[in-house]
Amino acid sequence: MDHILIIEDDINIAELERDFLQLNGYKSDIAEDGEEGLKKALTGIYDVIIVDLMLPKKNGNEIIKEVRKKFEIPIIIVSARTEDIDKIRGLDFGADDYLTKPFSPAELAARIKSHINRYKRLKGTSNNTQEIITRGGLEISTSSHRVQVNGEEVQLTSKEYSILVFLAENPNIVFTKDQIFEKIWGGEAYSDTATVPVHIQKIRKKIEKDPSNPEYIETLWGTGYRFKAFTLR
């Protein structure tokens, strides 16, 4: 049974989320403040973390930042903040998704299912053949879901990893942000194409020596993005 952590100081909302998720077959725990939430999140027992931004003791972005230092599991922000800057900041700290209050519990459950399924596919190790994509100092192991730059492992979210692998597996092909969005987010109508440049920027910060002059993922202004040629061994 997949295990969900709900970090939410409004107990009525937290219990609504918990009860609905339990009806849908998920085990759920609640933390009512940021410090308790971070402590539970860092135990590593959860498959998805749902976090509000406005929390007592420690805010949601601080929690996301700390969790991302250790884990790649899906993180979904559920917040009353509707400004684009809040969404962009949350994604920049490492969240995978953003849901605005008020929301449908059914939509939340659908998003959780989608993220868990994608994460499990990315982490799957049933194929013992080790495929490694290399380009300069960048190394991507598609069987173990590991990314290294100059021998040091970097932590990517599931969406960041999916974008990087998609581009790397199609070198020298230019993809528009609409095409990338359709490939990575698919039928997730609750997202929008504006999230693609945000994720590209986050990937560059993690893998590029100079994100403003990228070695791996190029921007073709007015067209889209392209991954420079690589070797496969």
Image (cartoon, rainbow, N blue to C red):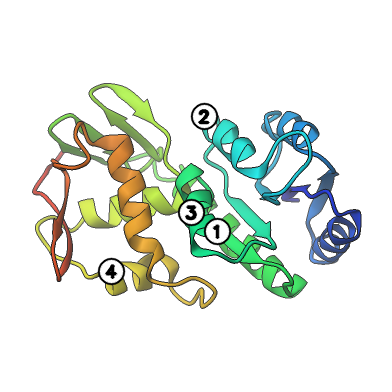
Label 4 close to label 3 by CB (< 8 Å): no
Q: Which mark is residue 121?
A: 3
Identify the mark nearer the N-term, 1 or 3.
1
Residue position marked by numbered label 2 in the rendering: 69
* Nearer to me, 230 or 214: 214
How far apart marks 3 and 2 lie (CA) works out to 22 Å
The mark closer to the camera, 1 or 3, is: 1
Do residues under tags 2 and 4 come within 8 Å of each other at their CB atoms?
A: no
**Which kind of residue does numbered mark 4 sit on?**
Lys
Label 1 vs label 3: CA separation?
18 Å
| Mark 3: amino acid | Arg
Sequence order check: which comes first, mark 4 or mark 3? 3
Residue 130 seen anywhere in this rendered image of the structure: no
Q: Position of residue 109 (x, y in %)?
A: 70, 66
Q: Residues within 10 Å of mark 1 (few under 14, many from 20)?
A: many
Name the secondary structure under disc 4. helix
Q: Amino acid at mark 2?
A: Lys
Q: Position of residue 133 (x, y in %)?
A: 21, 41
How far separated are the C-alphas under marks 2 and 4?
A: 28 Å
Q: Write down the residue under mark 1.
A: 97
Give the residue number, with chain letter if any, for mark 4: 177
Q: In x, y percent, where is residue 10?
A: 86, 54
N-terminal of the pair, mark 1 or mark 4, is 1
Tell me the CA gap for discs 1 and 4.
17 Å
